[in-house]
């Protein structure tokens, strides 16, 4: 079988590539661009191809990546501009200072479809792209751009993806190019004003997060047929959540705004929804039962609102759910027993609400749970003995409730934190807590625990903080490592050997000093008295 010969560039482009290699080795010797092969088509970051309309001719450069070269000299751009066959150019993670202005008159724009200048450190306004009519993908993210954006993009009729995220751009949102856009990412800038309704005309992915956008969300914004991702997190949007949702919607992030009203029941129409974040708003009312129709949900975050009432049993239908965050609301009633159906649940946070009743013992049998936070409720009863079952649980918060009974055996997987503080737990601290070798923080404060502290706790090699204050503990405090911060305040019968040994030593020294002073005083007094009597009676006269 004949060996396939590598492609070779025409003489003009081969000369251009050699000149480019020479410039890079002079300007950025640290770039480690491997150009040792005499054939530039075999260099890293380069793709060559023979034009389809000229079979048998020399190859040309189609794709060129010079990312992370640390380039800053604009003469490189002049050399690149002669590669008018380029369809893709990656100059990301360099340090050009006037690149947009140079590119505006660059002939390579005639065929270029993808231009990546992310992390390129380009202070100043976005340049003119008049000559780039075939450009489809433009990425200027994290590049220090400033000013407004609109007319610069008017000559890009084929633009499908625009990423200008994390610059210091401002003004109104650009819309002049939305008729062709599929992806628009403008996050982390200073865009202000209203969201224009036409911005999702053909868009499939829209990210306007962390700007200064205000006003209400357009009522039909989430209805675009092919729309799958919308992220409006961290703006100043107000009013109600729109009623209409596309069936194609996959991610919806509206957290960190000023939205009020209730969660619309029509959310159940978003049958493809996998990620829903409405946290940190002013939403009120209950969770609509229709949310149970979003059977593909993986993440549901409704934290830090003013939601109330009981959590609907329909939550238990979300058997794909991995993260459920309902903390810092006004939910009440019992923790729904249907949560035991969430077999993929990894994080459960119901803290800072008003849940009552007992903890459903089946919850601790969910196989993938790693973090449970029920802190700050009104939960009563004993901690279920099924708490020992989880194999993946690393963090458990049950503090600030009304739990009673004794501390049961804890799962050996616990490593980050175990917080049982501010309850009514009684009995002794179980010695088997000492098997939690990876536990970092243990808080048992403000309970009714009694008896000695088991010496097995000395074996918690990863422990950094132990809080056992305000109980009824007695005996002596074990000798923990110096790196462990121990708070044992409020246990009057607990002897801290280190502190008391010091007290005993100080007391002994004080007592010895007192005896010595008394003895000296006695001797001096005796001598003075004897001398005085001798003078009076003539014993010491000559």
Image (tube, rainbow, N blue to C red):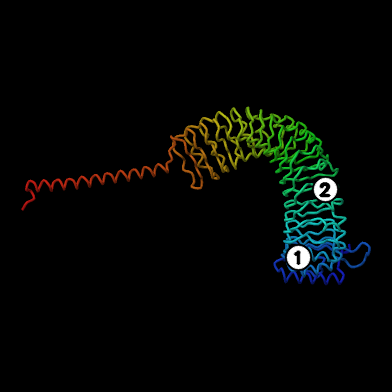
Secondary-structure class at tag 2: helix
Q: Quadrant of residue 383?
A: top right
**Which numbered disc, 2 or 1, marks the residue that appears first in the sequence?**
1
Q: Nearer the viewer, residue 522 or 126?
A: 126
Residue 22's image quarter?
bottom right
Distance in Å between CA atoms under marks 2 and 1: 30 Å
**Residue located at (71% from left, 30% from top):** 338
Vertical placement of 279 versus 340: above or below? below
x and y, in percent, of residue 303 in the image: 68, 38
Q: Which residue is mark 2?
A: 199
Q: Position of residue 167 (x, y in %)?
A: 73, 56
The residue positioned 93% from the left and 64% from the top of the image is 55
* Residue of label 1: 98
Local packing at callout 1 (Cα closer than 10 Å; few below 14, some 14-19, many 20+) is: some
- Does residue 225 appear in this view? yes
User: Looking at the image, which residue sits at the far left?
Assistant: 542
386 lies left or right of 487: right
Under tag 1, what secondary structure? loop
| Residue 194 vs residue 61, the one in the foreground | 194
């Amino acid at each position: 079988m004949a060996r396939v010969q590598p492609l070779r560039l025409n003489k003009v482009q081969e000369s251009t590539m050699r000149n480019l290699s020479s410039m890079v080795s002079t300007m950025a010797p640290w770039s480690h661009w491997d150009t040792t092969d005499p054939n530039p088509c075999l260099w890293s970051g380069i793709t060559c191809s023979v034009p389809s309309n000229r079979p048998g001719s020399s190859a040309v450069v189609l794709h060129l990546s010079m990312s992370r070269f640390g380039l800053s000299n604009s003469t490189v751009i002049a050399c690149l501009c002669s590669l008018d066959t380029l369809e893709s150019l990656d100059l990301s993670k360099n340090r050009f200072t006037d690149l947009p202005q140079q590119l505006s008159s660059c002939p390579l724009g005639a065929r270029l479809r993808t231009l990546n200048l992310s992390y390129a450190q380009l202070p100043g306004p976005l340049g003119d792209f008049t000559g780039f009519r075939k450009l489809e993908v433009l990425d200027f993210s994290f590049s220090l751009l400033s000013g407004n954006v609109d007319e610069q993009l008017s000559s890009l009729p084929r633009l499908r993806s625009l990423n200008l995220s994390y610059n210091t751009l401002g003004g109104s949102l650009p819309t002049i190019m939305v008729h062709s856009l599929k992806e628009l990412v403008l996050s982390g800038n200073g865009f202000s004003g209203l969201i224009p309704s036409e911005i999702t005309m053909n868009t499939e992915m829209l990210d306007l997060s962390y700007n200064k956008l205000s006003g209400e969300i357009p009522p039909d914004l989430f209805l675009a047929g092919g729309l799958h991702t919308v992220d409006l997190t961290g703006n100043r949007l107000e009013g109600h959540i729109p009623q209409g949702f596309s069936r194609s919607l996959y991610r919806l992030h509206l957290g960190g705004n000023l939205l009020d009203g209730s969660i619309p029941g029509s959310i159940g129409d978003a049958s493809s929804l996998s990620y829903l974040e409405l946290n940190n708003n002013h939403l009120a009312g209950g969770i609509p039962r229709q949310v149970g129709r979003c059977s593909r949900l993986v993440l549901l975050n409704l934290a830090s609102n003013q939601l109330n009432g009981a959590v609907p049993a329909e939550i238990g239908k979300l058997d794909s759910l991995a993260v459920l965050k309902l903390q810092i609301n006004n939910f009440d009633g019992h923790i729904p027993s249907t949560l035991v159906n969430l077999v993929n649940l990894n994080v459960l946070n119901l803290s800072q609400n008003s849940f009552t009743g007992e903890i459903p013992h089946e919850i601790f049998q969910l196989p993938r749970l790693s973090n449970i936070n029920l802190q700050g409720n009104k939960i009563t009863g004993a901690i279920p003995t099924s708490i020992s079952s989880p194999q993946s649980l690393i963090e458990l918060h049950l503090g600030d409730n009304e739990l009673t009974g004794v501390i049961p055996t804890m799962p050996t997987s616990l490593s980050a934190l175990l917080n049982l503080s501010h309850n009514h737990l009684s009995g002794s601290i179980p010695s088997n807590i000492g098997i939690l070798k990876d536990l970092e923080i243990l808080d048992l404060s403000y309970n009714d625990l009694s008896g000695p502290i088991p010496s097995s706790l000395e074996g918690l090699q990863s422990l950094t903080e132990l809080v056992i204050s305000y109980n009824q503990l007695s005996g002596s405090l074990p000798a923990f490592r110096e790196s462990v911060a121990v708070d044992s305040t409020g246990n009057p019968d607990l002897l801290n050997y280190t502190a008391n040994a010091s007290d005993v030593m100080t007391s002994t020294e004080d007592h010895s000093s007192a005896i010595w002073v008394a003895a000296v005083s006695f001797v001096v007094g005796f001598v003075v008295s004897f001398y005085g009597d001798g003078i009076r009676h003539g014993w010491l006269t000559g």
